Amino acid sequence: MSAPIIVGILSYGMSGRIFHAPFVSTNPNFKFKAIVERHEKKAATRYPDVISYNSIDELLADDEIELVIVNTPNNTHFDFTMKALNAGKHVLVEKPAAATGAEVKQMFDLARKVNRHLMVYHNRRWDSGFVLTKQVIESGRLGQLIEVTFRMDRFKRAISPKAFKETASTPANGVVYDLGSHLIDNAISLFGRPLSFTKTTGIYRDGSQVPDYFNYHLKYPNQLNVYLTAGLLLAEALPGFVVQGTQGVFSKERGDVQETQLDKGMLPTDPAYGWEPEGSDGKLVIMDLANKRCEELLKAPKGDYTDLFNDIYHTIRNNALYPVFEEHIAWQMELLEA
């Protein structure tokens, strides 16, 4: 077995605490060595052996660190990724990878030039509900697909204190870059680049400078229509996954529990991790040749972001192909920027 990958994380905010540190600290393929904490030193409470650097430059100067996780505000992703690559590090960057397609191209071009791997963190491919939806689609039981809808409904009247998400002059702002990048990646990972698309946005919260609602209509070959919707003033969450085909329909709420479990301190090594509670099943309805309705409840498989980190390990150590391709990010940026 190859040596574990030595990891440094650029921030111990929500994403560092929930989505990254628990995985690089429990997975034997990684060694969590260092983190950047410019103000409060909180990581030591849970990770007493991890070095807490005062600046990103200090962490990048640590020659032992091989992989840097860029989980800072959206508008810093480009600059910090370029710095990390120039420092000779492999990079895992949070979504959105950058603010523009031109920046994304520069990032991947530099990664090739310095012979390092650049990977974009799209954890929602490993959500339990999405994995089940993908299984149903790939089974062919729905026949020819007619319409696919992915949603993320929220109700948050208050303007976020995270200025980078809410300020019009800050690149990569608003719900389109925040939640839209997740939904667009879900669609692209299943169906590829759309033939064409339309994009609608709106601002509904009092005092908001940035869009807090969007809808995309993506058109694919064979008359497939894909709709992506998210908003911050949608009071009742509709099913997050709906797939209509010529032989039936599948629907499911967004029931993935990983973020909630991690936020409460559960580790990904816990046997209960990633399993949705009873009653969270997806519903599959198939119409037989006599037009008889046949209904089936499908239990979601375990959601597990550990698989994402295992893919990172194999990409760096074995030069395997990371499943979130550069082309996926380029196509995503086309939709985000439109």
Image (tube, helix red, strand yellow):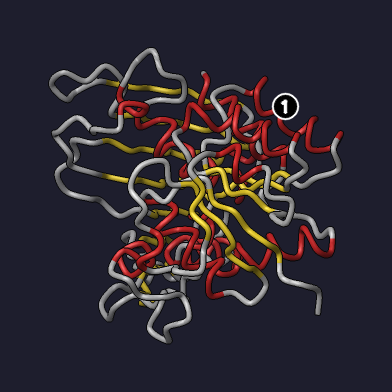
For the question of whether residue 149 can be seen, the reply is yes
Residue closest to the eye, 149 or 327: 327
Instruction: Classify 208 as above or below 259.
Output: above
Could you say which is closer to the camera, residue 28 or residue 296?
28
Check disc 1 and give the amino acid type. Lys
Residue under the image location 74 percent in, 51 percent down: 63
Q: Residue 106, percent across and down?
A: 73, 25
- Please state the horizontal and vertical placement of residue 16, each as a whole percent of the image: 44, 53
Quickly name the residue at label 1.
105
**Horizontal arrangement in the rendering, residue 133 relative to residue 174 (left or right):** right
Q: Name which residue lies at 40% across and 59% down.
A: 43
Q: Quadrant of residue 177?
A: top left
Q: Quadrant of residue 267?
A: bottom left
Please say if 259 is above or below 171.
below
Q: Position of residue 325 (x, y in %)?
A: 71, 45
Left or right of residue 135: residue 283: left
